[in-house]
Amino acid sequence: MFSFFKKKLLPTPPAATAAVPDTPLAATPATRVDAPLTSTTGSLIGSALAAPIVLADAPAPPPERQTWLAKLKAGLGKTAASLSGVFGGAKVDEALYEELESALLMADAGVSATQFLTDTLRRKAKAGGVTHPVALKNLLISILADLLQPLQKPLVIGQHTPTVIMVAGVNGAGKTTSIGKLTRHLAEHGASVLLAAADTFRAAAREQLSIWADRNTVEIISQAGADPAAVSFDAVSAGKARGKDVVLIDTAGRLPTQLHLMEELKKIKRVIQKADPTAPHQVLLVIDGNTGQNAVSQVKSFDDALGLTGLIVTKLDGTAKGGVLAAIARERPIPVYFIGVGEQLNELETFNAREFAQALLA
């Protein structure tokens, strides 16, 4: 559906793969494994996935992405109106800068990012002789896009078989839903995915992930009452034995202040490495775009504990203020692989710094 995948070709072009239909896949139930599996070395299931798959935006966004961008702008509309209102006057003066500073703080940009943005804007506006508010706004969009640019990096899969992705996040952030959406995107572009229901802490978590497995017609490793680390080990072993391209591990949601649960996450990571010394190849954190500066604290805590490789920012479709990404870029610039604007399978897209800056200041 979306053209955010690019396949890095080997010297010998890979065989063509069949196109995946653009309709929901829910006819075939997921395969469930309820016992530990013996680990054997898997092999690539097709030359189309022998080279890394890079999730990145195409130079010319297709109509579907344009529709999605409209949803993003609508989701950030309240904040965009507040920020854009600052530039509604006839002149650039000190009052405008003070109002902009307040608007950025209200948008959850945080003190550090707000000071950086306003100081840089003042300096560049003076150097460029900018005197009109509209021109100043366009300059701010460029500065914000530059600040966010380090967060715009592609998620690469295919360098390892399977690519093991461990997903963490607090309860309510949309972690399991994001896993379902990511599974859909991977499957649509030819990657075989195995899910691991290692969230044994939250009631009905296994059942929720099973629903996403059914919707995406992928296999799932799920064991009632099992130790999360054991489930993760079995999933990686199964992924290797079956030649899966990706193993997505859903871990229990927890607050970073719950030290005993954070230790369990560390244990999961250690046990995964027993099944595959190079894994996990990606450690993703799902954060709720509505939580403001608390999201920055979560990023710092989970990064310190696990060594995050990327973020998924969800729920940018309601009261989310969006400025938190500026705070993350300033304080802990971990790549934002995806942002989500709703609950549907097609409402998760790759992050683009300039697009986001334009949406935030539309």
Image (tube, rainbow, N blue to C red):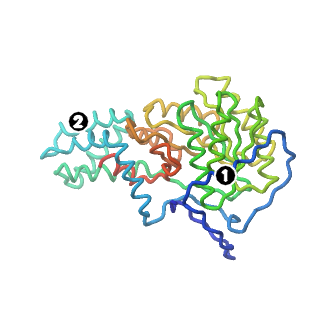
For mark 1, what is the residue?
Answer: 217
For mark 2, give the secondary structure: helix
Q: Is 76 drawn above or below residue 243 in the view shown?
A: above
Between label 1 and label 2, give the one nearer the viewer. Answer: 1
Q: Where is residue 9 in the image (x, y as percent from the top left)?
A: 64, 71
The residue at the point 34 percent across, 38 percent down is 114
Badge 2 density bin: few <14, some 14–19, many ≥20, Cα 10 Å: some
How crowded is the residue under tag 1: few (<14 C-alpha within 10 Å), some, or many (20+)? many
Left or right: residue 103 versus residue 151 is left
- Type of the residue with mark 1: Thr
- Front-most of residues 113 and 338: 338
| Residue 117 placement (x, y as % from top left) | 33, 43
* Residue 99, disc: 2
Can you give x and y, in whole percent of width and height, for residue 76 in the image? Answer: 35, 43
Q: Can you tell which mark lies on residue 127?
A: none
Q: Distance between the residues labelled 1 and 2?
A: 51 Å
Quarter-wise, where is residue 53 in the image?
bottom right
Residue reaching furthest front? Answer: 27
Instruction: Check if mark 1's residue and mark 2's residue have beta carbons within 8 Å.
Output: no
Q: Quadrant of residue 98?
A: top left
Frontmost residue, 213 versus 165 = 213
Give 230 or 112, whichever is nearer the viewer.
230
